[in-house]
Image (spheres, helix red, strand yellow):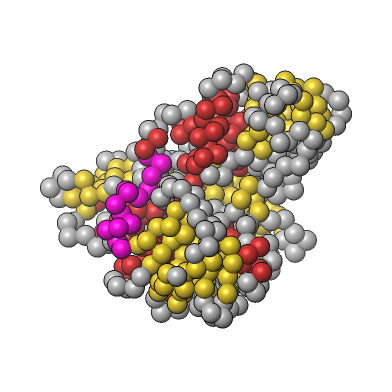
Amino acid sequence: MTDSINKIKKIIVDRNLCIGAASCVVVAGSVFELNGENKAVMKQKEGIKNSGPVEKENLEDSLIDDGTLILAAQSCPTRAIILYDEDGKQIYP
Amino acid sequence: MKEVKYLIIGGGIAGTTAAETIRQNDLNGTIAIVSDEPYRLYSRIMLSKPNFFLEKIPFEQIWLKKEPWYAENNIMLLAGKKAVSLDFVKKEVKLDNGEIVRYEKLLLAVGGCARQWGTNGSGKKGIFYLRTLDDAKAIISAVKSSKNAVAIGGGFISFEMCDMLKLAGINVSLILRESYFWEPILDEPSGRIIERALEKGGVKIFYNSEVKEIIGGDKAEEVILDKGERIPCDMLVVGIGVVCPFSWVQAGGISVNRGILANEYLETDKPDIWTAGDSAEFNDIILGERVQLGNWVNAQMQGRIAGLNMVGKRNPFKLVSFYTTQGFGITIAFVGDVKPGQDRLVIGRGLPDSGSYGRILVKDGEIMGATLINRTSELGTISKLIEKDIKVSGHEKELGDANFDLKKLING
């Protein structure tokens, strides 16, 4: 289900799991892109790009809706995108 | 006889995503997935990744759905069963155990099978293909006791298998029928970059070569090439392409070509039957061509659109998809449609000698696709240029300039 009651606060890309399949780039291209090593990184304010942890409010596209972020995480074929809510609880996977 | 509202043939990412999407939009309609593999959904894309093979990633990470997910979502998984015939008038599919399933709406997400190799001796043990989890398990086990391996064919699977085998400490010989890696999808300079990386990584490449015979008793021990070279081997990994297992679909009267034919809504030419994933040869409205794409993102997103359309929406499938890989210190990405053709202008981006080289394929003034070596970071921007049908006529020079920021073309 793509609906979630709790809001997403923090996002991490597990670099060991990421294989650069880039499904997150397809679903949420305003947040994710691949870096030179073929790993997903998140685009943040002031041009910072890394695999996190990143607070959602510090994303370049901080207004992205949670549904899209969850869909991006769910689309990852290695479940490398980890989402946390405001209480620090892991929402996905 | 079973009766279901939604019948899905294929339990891979396309079929399972469709089932999940249907359930989100139709809480009560009965759904069944028929899968010819005895497993729940797993990450097929991970099968060829060295980290998985070498067990650096826990095996459990392969599963994308927990066991109870199917029951929790009231989705019937008929695993280990094959569909063998289709009657689109009666709306029935027959399975290999004789069971008949009647449907209201049918999705054909049958995927592909590894193309089989017909060389002398190719029936011996020690010859592996990679398509299913069982294939991968067999290779994982063989790797542990092998010293010499032979890889057949140039492409993503071969590239990744060579990487995995070298990381496992095995001697690897790669046999190419072509004169360079990935001919004719890539141009020669791109192929040579990949070959340099492979050779630097210790892979011995034989060009313009074919295996004449595989020697050994019950098990492969040595291969003889058509030019006479002999290569000892304990295992062979064959990656020579994919064929779609849909003769029963064709016999059922559905129009097929290389894949199952579909329009932009992923509808086949018969009522209430859709197709998605590797087996779909569909009308791509972004590219303006009929294409068949065998990649994860395409299969997943098509499953979603097919699912939505099966519950009564009518959304066209619109996506620029891609596949990327890395190994031997380089990254390779294919975006959009990369098949060469006389109607395409190919613009080289950067200099091959620099090791960072792209090719942008243009048709009628618009980008159709791109191949990128060590330029994966441009993948997102090129996807956007394709998706938005940006006219690039007159900008050929910029496209060819590796230092030109392609993002500038998006905003005109």
Above or below, comparing residue B93 to residue B110 in the picture:
below
Above or below, comparing residue B5 to residue B170 in the picture:
below
Compare residues B200 and B105 and report the one nearer the observer: B105
Q: Is residue A82 left or right of residue B387?
A: left
Above or below, comparing residue B14 to residue B66 in the picture:
below
B62 is within the stretch colored magenta: yes
A21 is within the stretch colored magenta: no
Q: Is residue B232 left or right of residue B63?
A: right
| Region of the chain picked out in magenta, as a range | B61-74
Above or below, comparing residue A26 to residue A35 in the picture:
below
Q: Which image quarter is the N terminus of chain B in?
A: bottom left
Q: Residue at x 41, y 72 (%)?
A: B3
Q: Position of residue B120 (x, y in %)?
A: 79, 35
Compare residues B254 and A7 and report the one nearer the observer: B254
Residue B319 visible somewhere in the drawing = no
Q: Position of residue B141 (x, y in %)?
A: 52, 28
Q: Residue at x 54, y 53 (%)?
A: B295
User: Residue B82 sits in which quadrant?
Assistant: bottom right
Residue B254 visible somewhere in the drawing = yes
Please identify the residue farthest to the left as the structure is shown. A87
Q: Residue at x 61, y 50 (%)?
A: B113
Q: Residue at x 72, y 42 (%)?
A: B117
Q: Position of residue A6 (x, y in %)?
A: 17, 56
